[in-house]
C-alpha cells in the first residue's frame, strides 16, 4: 500500500473493503514497554470514529520498520506521543517525533509520570497529562468533525 504523502490516499486504499466514509488517522508513538496504555488510548480514539496507526497492528514480520513508520506518518492527520519514563529512553520515539514534525503534522505529547522537559524534541509543544486524556479526546473529536465537514 503506497502513500503519496496525502492522508486521503492511504485512507482510500486501506478502506477499500470498508464503508466509503472519510477516515481520520492518528499515529500513536510510544515505547513498546507502554503497549497496554497505548492500546487503551487507541480504544478511546477509535470510539470517536478515528483510526489509529499502532506498531503492534500495523507492522508485520519482514517490514522495514523505519519505512513503515514514515508511511504511517505520511498517512496520518496527527500524531500523539505517549511520553513516559520508558519512551524517554526509546530510540524509535524520537525518530517518530522527528518524522511527524518534519511533515508539519500536529503532535500532541501525552505525559505519563514525566515532565514535558524530559522529551527534548517536544519542549515547545503544549502537552496533556494522561490523567486529562479525556480533554485530548474532546479536542480530537472537534478536529475529526471539522475535517469531515471540509471534505464532505
Image (cartoon, grey):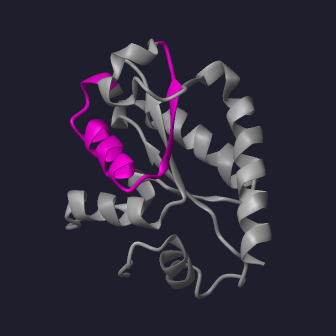
Position of residue 108 relative to residue 57, above or below, is above
User: x%, y% of residue 93?
Assistant: 31, 38
Residue 98 vs residue 43, the one in the foreground: 98
Position of residue 92 relative to residue 143, above or below, is above
**Who's the residue at 38% across and 79% down the image?**
4
Would you say residue 60 is visible in this rendering? no
**Who's the residue at 35% across and 66% down the image?**
71
Q: Quadrant of the N terminus?
A: bottom left
User: x%, y% of residue 141?
Assistant: 76, 49
Position of residue 81 relative to residue 61, above or below, is above
Would you say residue 141 is visible in this rendering? yes
Q: Residue 150 occupies which quadrant of the picture?
A: bottom right
Q: Residue 77 occupies which quadrant of the picture?
A: bottom right
**Who's the residue at 38% across and 53% down the image?**
55
User: x%, y% of residue 46?
Assistant: 67, 54
User: x%, y% of residue 84?
Assistant: 41, 22
**Residue 117: in magenta span:** no
Q: Which residues are magenta?
A: 88-113
- Position of 112 with respect to 48 (left or right) is left
Position of residue 49 relative to residue 89, above or below, is below
The mark tally for this picture is: 0
**Residue 100: in magenta span:** yes
Residue 146 vs residue 23, the one in the foreground: 146
- Position of 68 with respect to 144 (left or right) is left
Residue 53 vs residue 129, the one in the foreground: 129
Q: Residue furthest bottom?
A: 16
- Position of 149 with respect to 31 (left or right) is right
Q: Quadrant of the C terminus?
A: bottom right
**Who's the residue at 60% across and 23% down the image?**
130
Amino acid at each position: 500500500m503506497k502513500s503519496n504523502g496525502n492522508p486521503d490516499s492511504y485512507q482510500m486504499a486501506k478502506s477499500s473493503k470498508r464503508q466509503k466514509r472519510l477516515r481520520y488517522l492518528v499515529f500513536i508513538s510510544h515505547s513498546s514497554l507502554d503497549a497496554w496504555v497505548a492500546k487503551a488510548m487507541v480504544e478511546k480514539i477509535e470510539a470517536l470514529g478515528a483510526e489509529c496507526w499502532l506498531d503492534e497492528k500495523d507492522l508485520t514480520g519482514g517490514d522495514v520498520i523505519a519505512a513503515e513508520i514514515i508511511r504511517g506518518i505520511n498517512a496520518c492527520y496527527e500524531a500523539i506521543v505517549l511520553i513516559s519514563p520508558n519512551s524517554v529512553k526509546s530510540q524509535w520515539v524520537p525518530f517518530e517525533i522527528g518524522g511527524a514534525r518534519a511533515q508539519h503534522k500536529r503532535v500532541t505529547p501525552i505525559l505519563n509520570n514525566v515532565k514535558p522537559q524530559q522529551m527534548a524534541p517536544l519542549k515547545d509543544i503544549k502537552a496533556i497529562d494522561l490523567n486529562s486524556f479525556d480533554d485530548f479526546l474532546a479536542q480530537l473529536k472537534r478536529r475529526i468533525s471539522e475535517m469531515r465537514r471540509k471534505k464532505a
